Image (cartoon, helix red, strand yellow):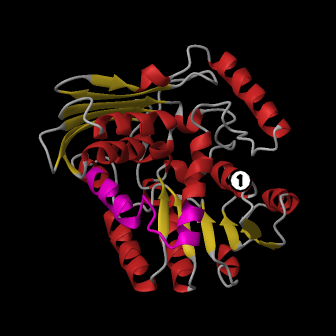
Amino acid sequence: MLKIGVIGLGKMGMLHMINATRFRNVVIVAAADASKKRLHNAAVLGAKNLFSDFRELLELDLDAVIISLPNFLHRESIELALENGMNVFVEKPMARTTEECRSIVNAVEKSGRKLMVGHCMRFFDMVREMKGTLDNGNLGQLENVTLENIVSGPFSYGDIPQPVPEWWFDPEKVGGGALLDIGYHLIDLYRFFAGDCHLLSSHLKHKFNMPVEDTAIAVVQSDKSSSSGIIHVGWYQQMVLSRNDMRVILHGDYAYISSEQFEPSNVYAYAIKEGVKNVFRKIGGRRIRPLTFSQHLDAYEQELKHFFNCLEKDLEPSVTAIDGLRTLEVIEEAYRRDKRVIVGD
């Protein structure tokens, strides 16, 4: 049985905690958050040891911790966990800067523990199918990857706690804006499809006159082939729930494949269909998949499943500290070229 602690009980931390309770080989021993209300919710989910200071939780005897703290606390909490012999699953971004990421990489190597970063989009069913199609040679040689994701960012009522935490808009604490928040995922997806890459060009926009960018366009180039990628992210679209302005297109010299080919034509009909499937799973004594009503939410459970499996079988996670560092290297280069974004401690 894996003994787990959860640090940070905001939207993502609570989602990870709920997902972790679904695994028979996992027990949530402890939780930490500054909010008494959130700690109460963690107690309802079974956490016996509750802390307002995450440093106290890291003194327990645990197999691993799930960290979903604000960006500026990632490095400290990760390195303390590793020093105390714990494996770590941390929400993206791994840290704010490449300097912090390199420090974490060194800490992982020194500790001999495992660290996995929450690059959840790799676990989307459609992404896995697209990767399989590419790896099987059905697209020919990969020439270009188009990746887009436009959301409402911190302005989305209900998705981000209200009022919006002040650190979201503090470059020193958050590390960046839309490129770090959303572009991080898409840069990682490009690396997933094409391998390591470097930045060719970028353009950051400040539509809302914030100290961090709300829109970013980046062009990247593979270090291993002639393929390139075009990345477009933004916080400027006030979407209605269930709509998803995201797409990934792999362009090969023989064929192409688009994520839109895997999107349900009617998201509500899709959700009902998945709900019915879960009813039959339960009747048949099989494990239900409660998050499949959304074609993307299930990825969060799948990434934790992978992490826990790696701990039990002593395997290296598919997303490591090196992946977190390589992704930040591209983002930090874009920030160097835009003097309005502050990088560093």
Between residues 172 and 97, which one lies in front from this camera angle?
A: 97
On screen, 93 above or below 145? below
Q: In this view, does 46 lie to the left or right of 235?
A: right
Amino acid found under the numbered disc labelled 1:
Met
Q: Does the magenta stretch include residue 149?
A: no
Q: Locate residue 233, reporting x and y percent.
A: 39, 33
Kindly identify which residue carries mark 1.
14
Q: Residue 50: give x, y in percent of width and height.
A: 80, 71
Q: Can residue 212 be seen in this view?
A: no
Residue at the outermost top position: 265
Left or right of 287 on screen, residue 175: left
The residue closer to the viewer here, 261 or 328, is 261
Looking at the rendering, the stretch of residues picked out in magenta corresponds to: 307-330
- Above or below, 56 relative to 283: below
Q: For the point 69% across and 42% down, which residue is it? A: 162
Secondary structure under tag 1 reads helix
Q: Quadrant of residue 178?
A: top left
Horizontal arrangement in the rendering, residue 267 relative to residue 125 (left or right): right
Question: Does the magenta run of residues contain 323?
Answer: yes
Q: Which residue lies furthest to the left in this view?
A: 226
Query: Residue visible at 67% across and 48% down?
Result: 11
Q: In this view, does 202 lie above or below 139?
A: below
Residue 36, image x and y in percent? 82, 62
* Quarter of the picture holding the C terminus: bottom left
* Left or right: 190, with 318 as reference point: left
- Of 334 and 198, nearer the camera is 198
Tell which of 7 and 308 is nearer to you.
308
Estimate the x, y position of residue 322 in percent, counting from the top left. Answer: 34, 65
Instruction: Give the image quarter of residue 221.
Output: top left
Q: Main secondary structure of the magenta part?
A: helix
